[in-house]
Image (cartoon, helix red, strand yellow):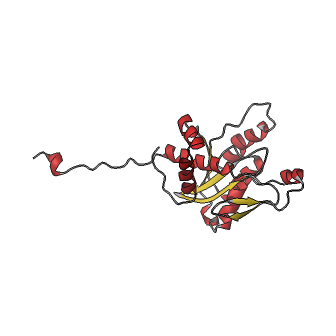
């Protein structure tokens, strides 16, 4: 009898790579975008400590509060003055930090990783630094042309704030086929939702 028959090798499931984790968590940040009520810009962010999502958020308008963590429905206290609401919006990065604190996960913020749909603005970058987050993964496709009104802020965050605070900024691209699946496949979006709610483990792409 052959040795391979005496000692059969079981087919082991391939472990999930770091790149795959980054893609799935980045899709989680994009999914959080869909919960924004802001009519101009929708952004999302999640915070991961080891393999646990400790906070998540989308950008909100003035007066909005999280009503139910499970379905992440947002209520507005005042719909009468749209301009006021927009001027008082809160960004997804800070909302995800608030969410982590609200859940009692503030001790897990130092050393964690934040996944964002777009490169953070200066106030959000300062909040990230203050929270002790040490890695930011950006999967956004926001226009970084020099004539953009946000260009100076982005350069300041990318080249000065984060390097000085020793925060690693990782830029990734989500493969087109995965992006398309995320857009059209509701079951896949449900899987991503369960991942960012710590209800499912990440599986290989």
Query: Where residue 87 sits: x, y (%)?
Result: 86, 51
Query: Where residue 196 sits: x, y (%)?
Result: 57, 56
Tell me which residue sits at (76%, 47%) in the image: 122
Q: Nearer the viewer, residue 112 or 33?
A: 33
Q: Nearer the viewer, residue 3 or 39?
A: 39
37 left or right, relative to 105? right
Query: Where residue 3 sits: x, y (%)?
Result: 14, 47
Give the answer, above or below, for where 5 lies relative to 178.
below
Any part of residue 130 in sight: no
Tell me which residue sits at (57%, 47%) in the image: 186
3 left or right, relative to 112? left
Tell me which residue sits at (60%, 42%) in the image: 183
Give the answer, above or below, for where 97 lies relative to 9.
below
Q: Nearer the viewer, residue 132 or 80?
A: 80
53 left or right, relative to 151? left
Tell me which residue sits at (69%, 41%) in the image: 158
Query: Where residue 157 sits: x, y (%)?
Result: 72, 44
Any part of residue 159 in sight: yes
């Amino acid at each position: 009898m052959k040795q391979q028959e005496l000692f059969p090798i079981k087919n082991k499931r391939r472990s999930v790579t770091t790149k795959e984790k980054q893609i799935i968590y980045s899709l989680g940040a994009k999914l959080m975008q869909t919960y924004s009520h802001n009519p101009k810009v929708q952004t999302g962010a999640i915070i991961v400590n080891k393999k646990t999502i400790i906070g998540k958020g989308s950008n909100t308008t003035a007066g909005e509060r999280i009503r139910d963590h499970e379905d992440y429905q947002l209520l507005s206290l005042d719909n009468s003055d749209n301009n006021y609401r927009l001027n008082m919006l809160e960004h997804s990065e800070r909302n995800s930090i608030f969410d982590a604190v609200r859940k009692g996960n503030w001790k897990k913020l130092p050393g964690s990783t934040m996944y964002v749909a777009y490169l953070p603005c200066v106030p959000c970058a300062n909040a990230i630094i203050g929270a002790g987050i040490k890695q930011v993964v950006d999967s956004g496709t926001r226009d970084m042309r020099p004539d953009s009104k946000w260009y100076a802020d982005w350069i300041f965050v990318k080249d000065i704030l984060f390097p000085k605070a020793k925060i690693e900024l990782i830029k990734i691209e989500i493969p087109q086929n995965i992006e398309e699946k995320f857009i059209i496949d509701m079951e896949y979006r449900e899987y991503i939702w369960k991942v960012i709610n710590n209800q499912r483990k990440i599986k290989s792409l």
